[in-house]
Amino acid sequence: MSLLPFGQLPPHSPRRFVPALANLGEWAQIAPLFDQLEAQLARATSIAELEQWLLDRGELDAALDEEGSRRYIAMTCHTDSPEAEKAYLHFVEHVEPQLKPKQFQLSKCFLEHPMRPQLPKERFEVLDRDTAVRVELYRDENVPLETEEAKLGNEYNKLTGNLTVDFRGEERTLVAMGRFQEDTDRATREEAWKRVTERRLKEVDRLDELMDGLVRLRHRCARNAGFENYRDYAFRLRGRFDYTPADCERFHDSIESEAMPLLRTIQGLRRQNLGVPALNPWDLAVDPLGRPPLAPFNTTVEMEQGTQTIFDRLDPELAEGFATMRRLRLLDLDNRKGKAPGGYQSTLAEARLPFIFMNAVGLQRDVETILHEAGHAFHALATRDEPLYAYRSAPIEFCEVASMAMELIPAEHLDVFYSAAEVRRARRVHLEGIVGVFPWIATVDAFQHWLYTHPEHSREERRHAWLQLMDRFGGDVDWSGFESARANLWHKQLHIFLYPFYYVEYGIAQLGALQVWTNSKQDAPKALRAYKEGLALGGSRPLPELFAKAGCQFDFSRKTVKPLLEQVRAELSKLN
């Protein structure tokens, strides 16, 4: 596909089962492979044959996964390309709906196979557990609903990816407008914020309509699977075996009791340093001492080079991984019109190589983002030699430990971008951001709990629920005159639209990452070894074991939250 920044990448291991020239965008060439796998499973009469069948099935799953990823990458890199959109939607509409019943049938046959209980328990218990959940939740009638859900998600990407404003004689993306929030001139910040906000508010009805459709579709899927609401269905679907909705609600409470006081302290100091009677939304990103914005780089080439230097200093294995990505052009980092918002790392499952997508515009946040997504990439690279496709990815709660720890541990090496004083400032900005993101995570997660346990809600009720959470977790920010912007602030959080209930994982993982960081302060080489050993497990063990291998506890109660935030408070005091 010519719209991809990288070319055709060979499989990590030569194909044994999938024909080398198979067109995996055409169902007529895919269907017989599933039939062959089903027949092969029926013939398997030994543990060796059953294990080989799992490898063959994984080979097909990986090849199909990569086909879908390549089309998604092309579409998000070029949301204004009819060619990329057509290819992506063809896969979503004509391949994925056909895949799901076939995959369900194979999983069902595997669970029923008489040799399965004889597979080595420790090696296959996670695979068994996850397969059983997929079979339990699968419903034929949900396949077209999931296709419609994916199409609505694509509409969100198209809509938000193409929003621009005219600002001071130049058309700019909303992402590019973010740098004006660091301008030391308050009038400039206010003008820029208002321009972006006005543009977003023009799309309120369209975004609300998309959310209405998504809630209806997701609720129907949950009811079809025998659940009272989508929240309970989503927890099961996401394989949350080690925590419950009630645990998440207690996490929200811990954030309210432990993070909010520190956030208000930070906000109070910011207001005092800015010399303003109240903080407005355009006062939250600027340097409170009136210094010009941190400018870590001018071009994405400089950002790449600086990031490489950081990893060169940190660890030879990580450095080689990032160098490989650069060499193979597995990075698309610059912001441009027609590119989807946000950033992500996507694994090309057959090549077993990571790809990083982001929208860099020369901000400190861009440095944090490239380090974050590199952490995900290192996770993918650490599992390249895992034979089982299912174990080459881990639960999100641990995937985000991989990424967030890479924001924290390299902080000592930010001098590749900054002077010594600026390093201290960048580290403070980052740690303050961690404090601030905990309440935002609680807001987004609690909002989704409400959304899907009240599926018949009106738009007005939805806004009211959001505003109640903003009152609880929004801190000391004055939105007077901009009440509509505050009520619709959730529209900019793409996870609510595209990845329901994928957000509390960031908070859980942040606690893990803070533990890795704390460990690194005591013994950096040991902490980094444990981190890499945890990544290398992929998804082969349950979450608590993954955390333990990386040197962390899987716990997000107050007893864990409180001391970690005290550590952050102490570090912030040193950086003042």
Image: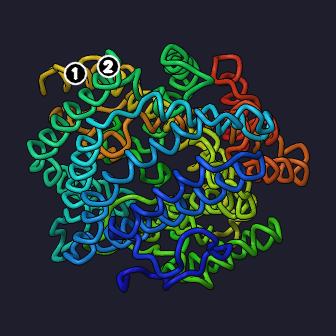
Q: Position of residue 242 (x, y in %)?
A: 63, 24
13, above or below 175, in the image: below
- Image-quadrant location for residue 25: bottom left
**Helix, strand, or loop for circle 2?**
loop
> What residue is shown with label 1?
455
* Quadrant of image for the N terminus: bottom left
- Image-quadrant location for residue 165: bottom left
* Image mark count: 2
183, above or below 19, in the image: above
Lateral position of residue 6 relative to residue 407, left or right: left
Find the distance from the CA under tag 1 to the CA under tag 2: 8 Å
> Which residue is pictured at 71% across the width and 37% down the height?
115
**Closest to the observer: 239 or 459?**
239
> What residue is shown with label 2?
229
- Image-quadrant location for residue 222: top left
Lateral position of residue 116 relative to residue 287, left or right: right
Q: Position of residue 81 (x, y in %)?
A: 23, 76
> Which residue is pictured at 29% across the width and 30% down the height?
221
Whether pointer 1 and pointer 2 mark residues with C-beta atoms closer than 8 Å, the reply is yes
> Which residue is pictured at 72% across the width and 52% down the height?
49
* Quadrant of image for the C terminus: top right
